[in-house]
Image: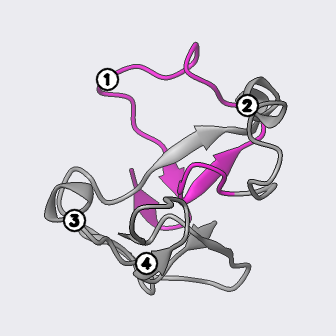
């Protein structure tokens, strides 16, 4: 699991990008509500809230981008909260539900 705080990121030479894309890996128990994980922020209203509270990405796909984007982190590369080792887009369908501790996502 990973969470992030809103900050100015230096990914553009024109201006800083205000985002919570830069996530920190967490290992402690964390509350997940309908608006997201405790400690996770979103800089834009359309990036969070009910039905948009958690972002997941398959670690399997990291290799597709690491040659072009070698300076990105090894976890939460795309700002995801959950990085899956054994789950990718071929296994996930609209309407699927998964249990994460006591939460049903």
Q: Earlier in the sequence, mark 4 or mark 1?
A: 4
Q: Please indicate, yes or no, whether residue 19 appears anywhere in the rendered image.
A: no
Query: 61 or 82: nearer the eye?
Result: 61
Residue at x 54% of width, y 60% of height: 11
Residue at x 19% of width, y 63% of height: 49
Query: 12 or 55: nearer the eye?
Result: 12
Q: Earlier in the sequence, mark 1 or mark 2?
A: 2
Looking at the rendering, the stretch of residues picked out in magenta corresponds to 76-105
Q: Earlier in the sequence, mark 2 or mark 4?
A: 4
Q: Please indicate, yes or no, whether residue 77 appears anywhere in the rendered image.
A: yes
Name the mark nearer the viewer: 4 or 3. Answer: 3
Residue that badge 1 annotates: 94
Tag shown at residue 65: 2
Tag shown at residue 40: 4
Q: Looking at the picture, does residue 27 appear above or below residue 86?
A: below
Tag 1 secondary structure: loop
How far is disc 4 from disc 1 in space, using C-alphas? Answer: 24 Å
């Amino acid at each position: 699991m990973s969470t992030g705080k809103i900050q100015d990121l230096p990914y553009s030479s024109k201006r800083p990008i205000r985002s919570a894309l830069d996530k920190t890996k967490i290992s402690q128990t964390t509350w997940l509500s309908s608006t997201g994980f405790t400690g996770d922020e979103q800089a834009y209203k359309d990036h969070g809230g009910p039905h948009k509270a958690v972002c997941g990405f398959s670690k399997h796909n990291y290799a597709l981008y690491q040659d072009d984007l070698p300076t990105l982190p090894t976890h939460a590369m795309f700002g995801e909260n959950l990085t899956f080792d054994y789950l990718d887009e071929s296994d996930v369908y609209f309407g699927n539900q998964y249990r994460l501790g006591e939460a049903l996502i």
